[in-house]
Image: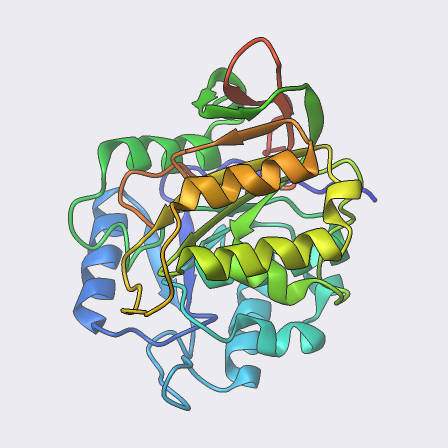
Amino acid sequence: MEIIKSKPLKKNAVIGLISPASPQRDPLRLERGIAYLERCGYRVELGKSALNSWGGYLAGTDDERRSDIEDMFANPAIDAIFCARGGFGTARFLNGLDYELIRKNPKILVGFSDTTALQSAIFSKTGLITFSGAMPSVDMADTFHPLAEEWFWGIISNSKYGLEQNISAERFYEGNATGRLFCGNLTVVTTLLGTPYTPDWEGGILLAEDIGEEPYRIDRMLSHCENAGLWNKLSGLCFGQFTAEGVRQSTVPQRPMNEVLLDYVSRAKLPSLGNILYGHQAEKITLPFGVTVQISNEDSFLRMIESPLD
């Protein structure tokens, strides 16, 4: 597959803002996120359904949300596309998206959480590297964490930034690995297995995170990945943060999350890192979906060895 990269984001660029998943719970947060982007010197163009709500948990119908994405890629005046927030429902329109349009008009696309579905599909169908990280109505509405802010702008505006960073981690399993980074929400990754919208896992490195899931549910997802044969294809396995926010009270006996992760690492026997600052928390890094990364047995860092930008 030919890998496609976007040009670095320049000052005074025009940012298209879309809501491919859920509606804005608090539109004022999005307003504050837009104000932050404008203070940074950018102009923001809202997608037609960016402020819509349909079906309770969707920001517009499938066609409306899909059209917003296509319109942003097709519009030559738009320099980058930011997803306002995550939520639910992005996978609903993957089978109708115009991937050839996206391939012919590569642009920076940034999103997180449910946007994993869109990023996985776009990379699988076009080879375009996108970015998994901070979003306007989530991270930029109030105090943008300094580390998150530095990583966000650095990785999308400086072609050398990622190559100069050592991503700190905790060693989970020994070994060396080099492969394309497939990063995202574990729940979404799991639901895409068996569809045409997952990347070629062969030789890749999976970096997974999640929020609001009890250990037994993470266990079930990882067992599904194992049963789907992922451990036989990947060259490495990494874990971000598994935050407890939103976890419902349950009668299921609890097991420490790290114990679950380490259990599957020992079963996979793949070079593995954990506790990476990537997840549903303020202090997080933005990472390129599809870039080549490396795990070295000599230390506990994840390193980019390829620039995500053209």
Let me know if residue 118 appears in the view.
Answer: no
Residue 70 in picture, x, y percent from top left: 60, 69
Residue located at (46% from left, 40% from top)? 259
Quadrant location of the C terminus in the rendered image: top right
Quadrant location of the N terminus in the rendered image: top right
Residue 229 in picture, x, y percent from top left: 78, 51
Q: Residue furthest top?
A: 298
Let me know if residue 4 appears in the view.
Answer: yes
Q: Nearer the viewer, residue 275 or 125?
A: 275
Residue located at (30% from left, 47% from top)? 281
Residue located at (29% from left, 31% from top)? 147
Residue located at (65% from left, 41% from top)? 290
Residue 236 left/right relative to 157: right
- Total marks shown come to 0
Residue 242, relative to residue 160: is it above or below?
below
Residue 134 in picture, x, y percent from top left: 36, 48
Residue 12 left/right relative to 259: left
Residue 2, by quadrant, is top right
